Image (cartoon, grey):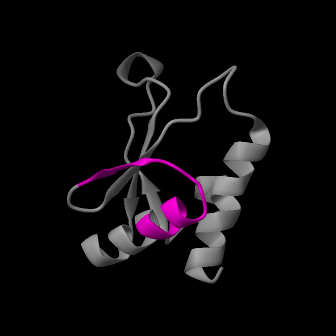
Amino acid sequence: MVRARLDGVLQIITPTEPERHGCQLSLRVAGGREQGRSLFEYLQSVGVLGDWREPDVIRISPTPMYNRYRDVYRFIEEVETWAGV
């Protein structure tokens, strides 16, 4: 969904090879640090929790058996709201 709906807003920088990644997704925010920090703070304000990494990366960890598909979908919707997509 990130690639399909948020192209130009977020870039997935997590390696695609299963042996090189866990469940977290590292996302670079287009527009640099200011845009990234703005999105991160917006997500926190609406209850979507992640992790901030300088200079412009948000880490989100959808965990099997803990998060539901709806949680992942809400993340996409909230980023779209913030980006005006």
Range of residues picked out in magenta: 41-53
Query: Is 51 left or right of 9, judged from the image as shown?
Result: left
Q: Residue at 49% across / 72% down in the picture?
A: 8
Of residue 63 and residue 31, the one placed in the foreground of this image is: 63
Q: Is residue 47 above or below residue 83?
A: above
Outermost residue, top direction? Answer: 19
Q: Is residue 42 magenta?
A: yes
Q: Is residue 21 above or below residue 85?
A: above
Residue 66 rendering spot, x and y as whole percentages = 66, 25
- Residue 74 left/right relative to 17: right
Residue 63, located in which quarter of the rendered image?
top right
Residue lying farthest to the bottom in this orientation? 84
As for residue 43 lying within the magenta part, the answer is yes
Image location of residue 45, percent across then percent down: 53, 66
Q: Residue furthest right?
A: 70
- The residue at the point 51 percent across, 36 percent down is 61
Q: Tell me residue 43's x, y (percent).
A: 53, 62
Task: Examine the rendered structure and indicate whether residue 52 appears above or below residue 66.
Answer: below
The residue located at (70%, 64%) in the rendering is 77
Q: Nearer the viewer, residue 50 or 73?
A: 50
52 sits left or right of 10 in the view: left
Q: Point out residue 62 in the picture as x, y percentages from the top left corner.
A: 58, 35
The quadrant in which the C terminus is found is bottom right
Measuring 29% from the left and 77% from the top, which residue is drawn there? 34
Q: Nearer the viewer, residue 64 or 41?
A: 41
Question: Total number of numbered labels?
Answer: 0
